[in-house]
Every structure is written in C-alpha cells, then in structure tokens.
Amino acid sequence: MALRQTGSTMLRRLAPILVVAAAVLAAAAEGWLAPLDDWLSDQRFALTGRTPDGAVVVAAVDAKSIAALHGWPWPRRIYADLVDRLKGLGAAEIVLDIDFSAPSSPDDDAALAAALERAANSVILVAFDQKLSADDASGQLGANRPIAQFADHAWVANVDIRPDHDGRVRHLPYAVAAGGEVLPSLAATLGGGAGRIGDGFRVDFGIRAGDIDRVSVADILAGTVPADRIAGKKIIVGATAVELRDFFDVPVNGTVPGVLLQALGTESLLAGRALTRTGSLATLLGLALVIALAVFVRRRTWDRRLAVFALSALAVESVALAVQATWPVEIATGAWDVALLGFAVATLLSEIDVRRILIAISRTETRNLQIILDRVVADNFAGVLVVDEAGTILSASRSAAFILGIDRELVGRGIEGVVPDRLRQVLSRQIAELRAGVWHEEGQHEIVHQRGGREIVLEYVATPSRMDGGFAEDGSRLADSFAACLTFLDITERRRTAERTAYLARFDTLTGLPNRNQFIERLETELGRAGGNLPAVICLDLDRFKTVNDTLGHVFGDMLLRAIAVRLREIAGNENFVGRLGGDDFAIIIAGRDAEARAAVLASRLVTGMSVPHNLDGHRLVVAISVGIASAEPGDVEALATLKRADIALYRAKSNGGNSSVFFEPAMIAGLAARQTLEVELWDAFENGEFEVYYQPEIDLRDERIVGAEALLRWNHPTRGLVSPGEFIPVVEAIGLMEPLGRWVLAEACRTAVAWPGKLRLAVNVSAVQFTRGDLVEAVGSALATSGLPADRLDLEITESLFLQENRTIAATITHIGALGVSFVLDDFGTGYSSLAYIRKFPIDKIKIDRSFVTEIPMNPESVAIVRAVAALADSLGLRLIAEGIETAEQVKFLRLLGCHEGQGYLYAQPLAARDFVALIEGLKPRAIAQSRVV
C-alpha cells in the first residue's frame, strides 16, 4: 500500500513535467517550433557581426545610374560598355543580374554579344523561373534563360530565391532543376559551393551587408572608379534602385536588394560560413537533458526552480551563440527554451491560485482595452461618434467637433443640431434594422454638408452594434441595448484635388488647351470613325521663340504662349480641335470631308494671322510660325503615325527658314534620316579625331604684313572629304557637341600657335553655347597654361547675339577672361543687334566688319556708308578695325582709305592646314615676319 501511494505521489509530481515534455515533442514534430528557431538564429546573427572578406563588389543599378542614363530599361550597348570597362579595370568575374531572355535591337544585342566574347568566359548571366503568364492561376513556372546569342559566350547561373514561412529569405540553393536542365545557383557558382539539386545552405547574415563594397554603375561608366576597387574582384551587377522592386526581407538587415542577397550568399561560401542547422536527434538529446534537469530540481523550492530554469535557458543560448559565431552551425534551441519556459510556468501555476490570476488578468485587460479604445476614438484623425438608441453621444473624437464645426464638448450631448439630419436618419434606421435582425452592411457613402457658409463633402460609414445586457443581481437576464458608430471624413480637398488631377491629365495648365494626352485620344477617336473621310493634322511651333525667353524672360514667354493659344482658337474655329503638345508646339485636328484641303486653307490663315503683332504688357512682339501638315493614311489606327508625319513636315518648314507651311511628302523621311545620320556621324567624328583646325592669315592693311591668323574648324569626313561648316556647325550646336568641340579647338589652336615665329596673334571663335554651358574661363586658362601661349597673343571672337541674353554669368565670364590678358573681337559687326552699350560695357578690343558689307564696296553706297560709320565708331572708341572677305585690291585700297587696320580674305590666302600655314610663314625671310608681305 505504501509503495502504491509513493508511486502515485511521484507520478503526480512528475505529471506537469511529462505534460510539458509531451507538448514540446508534439510541437517539434509538427514543425511548429521552426519559426522560433529561425528567430533565435536571427538574433544571434545580430550579435555576431563579421566583416566580409572583400572578394565581392556590387555594381549598383541605383537611382543615380538611372537618372544619368535617362531612365530604365537600358539599351544593351550600355551593358556592353560596362563589361568592357569592368574587364579593363581587372575584374576577375562579372555577373549581369539582368533579364536577357528576349532579344532587343539587333545592333544592341550584337554589341553585348561581342563584349561577352571579349570577356573570354568570365561573365555569368542569370536565369530564373517565373509564371508562364501574368493571368495564369495555375502557378506553373516557366524557365527564363538568356538568349543563345549571349549564352554562347558566358556562364549561366540560377538566381531564384524562395522565402521562408515568414516571408524572409534565410537560405539559397546550390543548384536548381527547371525546364529540363540543371543550373548551379549564382552564389554557388561565385562562391565555389556544391550540393545536390534541391539542397541549399543557410546564409550567414552575421556578415555585415553594409560593409560589402558597392559602386554605382554610373561611376563605372564615367570612369571615376579606382582600379583597385575592381581588380581581382567578383563583380555582381544588379538593381538596387527602389523603383526596380528587386528587394527581399532578410534577418538583421531588414529589406535588401536581391543583388546584395546574392553577394551575402557568395561571401558565406567563400568564408566557409554556409550554415547548417542541427537535426531532430540533437533536439531529442538536448530535450532529454532538460527533462532530467526538471526532474532533478523538482524537490527544490519554487523560486529556486525558476532561477535554475532561467539560468539554464541563458546558458543554452550563450553556448548556441558561441557555436554559431565560431562554426557554421545553427543549434536549434527552440524546443529546449520552450520546455524550460513550460517547466517555469508549471512551477508558478502549482504555487498560485490560477483562477484568481485569470480573473485579475481579465479585469485588467478589460480596463486596459477600454482605455485604449477611448484613446483610439479620441485621437482618431477621422470624425468618430458613438451614439446610443436615445441619440446621446457616448464617445467622440476631437476631429468630429472640428469637421462638424462644433466648438463644444460632444460627449453626453444629443445628436440633434450636431449631426446632419441625413446622418441622424441613417443612424436611427440602422439601429432599428439591427434590432429587427434585417441589417446589412452598406459601405461608404457621401453627403454634402453646410459648414460656416460653405459646402463640404463628407464621406461616412455607419455601423450599429448590439451590447450584451448581462445579468442582474438576482441572476435574471437583462435586455440587450443598441448603439451605432458613425465614422466620417471631410474629403472636400481630396475631391478638389482629384478633379484638379483629372484636369491636369487632359489639359495644359498654362494655356487651358487640351494637352498631348487628350490630343492623341481625340485623334485616335477621329481615325476610328473616319471611314472614307480621313482627318488631317497641323503641327506648328513659333519661330525664334527662344529669343523671346532669352531677351524678355520666361514670364513674357508664358504670356506669349497664352496669347498664341487664344489666337489659335480664334483662327481655327470651334469645328477644329486645337491642343498644345508642349513647349511652343501646338497642333490642330481637321476632321470630316475635304480635311486636307481645309487644312491647307487653315494653314495659310495661321501663317498670316499669327504674324500680326502681339501687345504684351507694353511690349510689341511679332512672332512668325512654321507649319507642317499631314493627312491620315488608310490603315492608320494610332495617332502617333499621323502626328509624326506632320512633325516631319514642320521640321522641313523650319529648315526652309520658317514663316511658312509645308505638306508632308514621303521623301522628307529620307531627309530626316540624313539629319539623324549626320548627328551620329558628328559624335563619331569627334571621338575619331576627324576634325581639323585651319588657319587664315590676318594682314595689316597698311603694309600687308602678316600679324596673325584666325582658327577655323573643318571636318574631314572619311568619305565626303571636307564638309562645309555651314552644313555641320548648326547641327553641332543643336546636339550639344559645341562645348566639348569648342574646348578642343581652343586647346589645339593654342598648342599650334605657340610654335609660330614672332608674335603672331591667334583668333579663335567662341560660340554663345560655350558661355552658357561648361566653364569657358577654365577652358581658356587651361589652353593657355597647357600650350604656353602668352595670353596677350590670343583673341576670342564673339558675336553680337551673345549680348541679347543679358546674362550675368556671360558678363562675369567675359570680365574674368579679360583679366587673364586675353582680347575680345566683336565678329560679324553690323549684321545683328549692334549697340554701343555693350561695346562700352565689355572689354572689346577689335571690331570685325562682316564680309557681306566688304564684298559690296565700293559699288554699293549703303555698304560704303556702313563701313565708314563703323570705322568712325572704332576710331572714336580707340578700337582696331578688321575686315573679312577681302577679294580684290580695290577693296583693300578703299578699306585703307576708310581707316580699316587689318583684313583677311582670299585675296591674301584661303584657310590653310596647320602645316601649310607654317610653310607660308617659313617661306618668308627669317626674323622678318613682321616686315613680310603676302603675295
């Protein structure tokens, strides 16, 4: 009997331990403790930070790169350039974590394939799996692989990533089987890891992701990345910009780009830190030790048992932390920690009245919940009112009084005179419906409410609730009561913003005309219903509109655009659709019968009507327009095709000098293509060194000795020979090449002139573009310093149009260059906007008379008068006068009589290549250049 009682007592004491142990074993077997093991491992990573070995560098496709390369996606020639630059910097391996599963343009694809071939099998391209189609609900995946044109010259690795149960990524595969082939993972390929298909390794997130070297693709392409950051490294090129959405949740580091996750996996393998987690056998052995510990201390007092369990848990986690920091092993301690916690809870429950604790906890939670709910209601940004059946306000947010325009406390008041009548009716009806058991949720609604003399729009939701009546003291059941919660927002501004946004999406804010989006929609509508009556399109823009902005400012430019819009509506009439496409570009749709003929008539009226002066704030402006006309063609369904033809015709009208209209002809496409080809050839010419500087002698007219030369740019085209500057200079300015090309001309001419004998001067033309872009002061200083040419031998020729801009930067630039000792020559004087103001204001040393006046003297009296006036002006201001375009001895004689000091022209010599100009000088007597005469 005693033995039986002793066994029963022991079993009773061991029962809590056995129950806890059984529960933990069941949880571990079902995998319920895996999230806890993951969390514990994540915390250990956070405590064991380690530095990467630096073998991996991330080349980031970041926001800076996207902005520098004008958006995303990029042409594949950019990746070709990137591969070449990385190989040039000594990269050991290059990974392009970019989707190349579909062809792009043949030229771009060929460029990338060639770069991959040059890289000699040191480039890795990526493959991945994705849904067969966006609307495929089956979940079936298809394999995306680089096209054969690229795969033939590179390795291919898989970059598929599978998050864990909680959405975080903790492990990467060694290899993946998909689409009938087996591919190694990217991390395994770079890190040298190997494993079976489907097996993976746990990434060491103790490696500090922020310490992995990261460079911007834009900096690599710009050539600003030092070679020592790339040489011998494994480079992974991938997206880090937020807008590219290639991000994953990982332990410790939060959300990281996929390319950085691949780098962490590679670093883990390279450092021998591909972690594995202990299995079920280790869990069972450890659990057995924990159970034995619980049995061993069961006779101790409850507080000592709690201390033992707490210290044991601390010891377990400390050991696990040390092991994970030293070896690539994660110890699954979740089951042990849960068992220790369970034993501690069982110890507490055995010593305390459980029922009393539960009651106290329940009451505390109820009070806390009520406090929280009251605070949530009071602090809610929305208006919230809780109303009982009698219409009394039980609870209210502070926002409710503000939105309704009530300046008094609302709680305890009736809703009469507070809540709009319609809302009071909604609350009463919904409470009645809930009491009758027929209420159904209605969702959000809107009403217009008068507040402070203005209308506001309220968006509201009303929800009734049944409240349990509970029991009376005698145990009888009390009747349930009802209340309703009204939640509302003032959406007046949101509504106005939405209306404004809708307006902005379809109308131009400056002129009120339909914008490009609406214009294209309207044109496509007209194309769809045209039948046999195809519409026509007129494209027009203002001639020399930039001059208005530069001279009067953008405020007057905007005023002019509004005036143009008004006049366009008047001339076009209500039957035609007028829109603004952007800038000073406008367009008109002519629909219905005889659209092409009516478009021709309208275009003529536009050219005439727009030339009528505008009076804007006291300024009288005359602005001509160029007009392009195109008719839709059978089969046109997209507006852009017709619009493009009209735009090509507009380009031809502007090329013809403007103030005219031109109908589209198919031959114009060839002309546009020729212009585009010329633009490309000019950039290639600059890169390939096809430009040359020629020199035309400048002669002292008194004794016809050489005093200097003007540097003139020439383009030696590989097939066309020398191309006229009049053909390519306007294009150079239009495509943004003038600043770097002008810098090169200045440096090259100074380098050449420093070797000339004597003190011959050098004149170099400087475009207005060079003043507004780049740093002309630095360019001049650099050219003089590098060449050694004295500053007093350099003349910079500028045109009168430069001073139209009234730009402080231009004035400061001229002043700073003048301070260096460089002289300025005012070129083409008399042809533009001649003014004594800027001659007195700026350090002008010479005036050059335009050839158009020189060629007509002495036969044209007007030209003679102009030259005589300019000579008198130069003499009175102490300026030297030079004439260009001299072709006859009679012109020389006349210019000499008028007081002109210097001249240049074919009478003396045409522009010469540098070596020919030197030969001309050296053919004269030594030490007598200043006394020489040009024959």
Image (cartoon, rainbow, N blue to C red):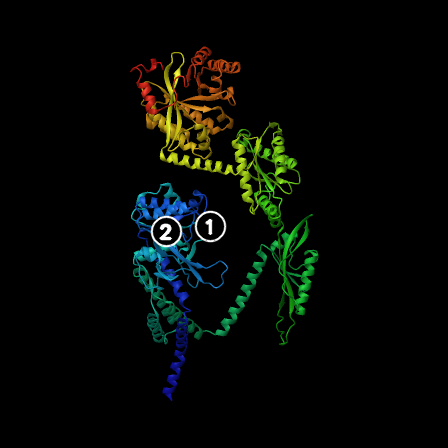
Front residue (pair 68, 424): 68
Q: Position of residue 308 (x, y in %)?
A: 36, 70
Front residue (pair 17, 259): 259
Residue 150 numbered tag: 2
Front residue (pair 789, 535): 535
User: Is any part of residue 330 visible from this angle?
Assistant: no
Residue type marked 1? Glu
Q: Secondary structure at mark 1?
A: helix
Residue type marked 2? Phe
Q: Position of residue 28 (x, y in %)?
A: 39, 71
Mark whose residue sits in front, 2 or 1: 2
The residues bearing labels 2 and 1 have C-alpha atoms spaced at a distance of 27 Å
Taking the image as shown, residue 385 lies to the left or right of residue 70, namely right
Quadrant in which the N terminus appears: bottom left
User: Is any part of residue 484 visible from this angle?
Assistant: yes
Taking the image as shown, residue 54 lies to the left or right of residue 347, namely left
Looking at the picture, does residue 768 appear above or below residue 80?
Answer: above
Q: Position of residue 91 (x, y in %)?
A: 31, 47
Q: Toward which corner of the image does residue 442 lie, by quadrant? A: bottom right
The residue carrying mark 1 is: 243
Dot 1 crowding, Cα within 10 Å, few <14, some 14–19, many 20+ = few
Front residue (pair 430, 804): 804
Please report the residue visible at 41 percent of the width from the left and 13 percent of the height from the top: 701
Q: Toward which corner of the image does residue 773 lie, by quadrant? A: top left
